[in-house]
Amino acid sequence: LLHISTSSPRSSMDFNTYIYDLEAGSKVKIAKSTQPSWINNTKIAYRKPQSNDSGIYIYDLDTKQSEKLAGVGKSSFDPRVSQDSKTILYSDYATQKLYIYDLDAKNMTTVIDSAVDGLWINEDTFVYQKTGKCIKEDDCPMSTYTRLNLVTLNTKSNDKVELKIDNIYLVASALDSR
């Protein structure tokens, strides 16, 4: 299976995700979706942007149905499925917090305040960008916060390691090997 997430030349807000079954030669379109992340071979997490029902969803390839994750806010983005496929790490623009959604328990937990752009490194550890308030308007032309250093967090031991890198933007685009 292969997924491609697009934006249309007609509108920068025209998002779709296409899932191709290369063996069968078939294609499934998930309309109004972006930032896909595979859970397993039949389910994919994604963000539904710019609508009254924005948030994080799971699409089931077998049933061809989407389900919104309960309790996840409209300004949530960038879902990242853990390597054991048990949790989804995601950011929230409005709160500038990272959350973990437990797929079995169907609940979320706030993990880190003043953070965005989480990316799993292994089953227990992820890296994220620490954020801070903008001091001058020129410091933050596209948001209300500034991005500071990268930090790793081990969810089992709660150990944090701050990586001293100036002016870094974490681009959470990793090849999903599932």
Image: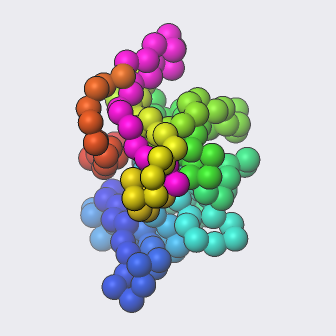
Quadrant showing the N terminus: bottom left
Q: Which residue corresponds to the image point at 50% horizontal and 10% vertical from the top-left?
A: 157
Residue 24 image point, x, y percent: 32, 66
What secondary structure prevails in the magenta region? strand
Of 58 and 96, nearer the camera is 96
Q: Which residue corresponds to the image point at 46% horizontal and 79% vertical from the top-left?
A: 14
Which quarter of the figure has residue 152?
A: top left
Whether residue 33 appears in this view of the structure is yes
Residue 147 in the image: above or below residue 124:
below
Q: Is residue 39 magenta?
A: no
Residue 54 image point, x, y percent: 63, 64
Q: Which residue corresponds to the image point at 55% horizontal and 67% vertical from the top-left?
A: 49
Which quarter of the figure has residue 103?
A: top right
For the view shown, which residue lies furthest in the front direction?
136
Quadrant showing the C terminus: top left
Q: Which residue corresponds to the image point at 70% horizontal and 32% vertical from the top-left?
A: 105
Magenta range is 144-161
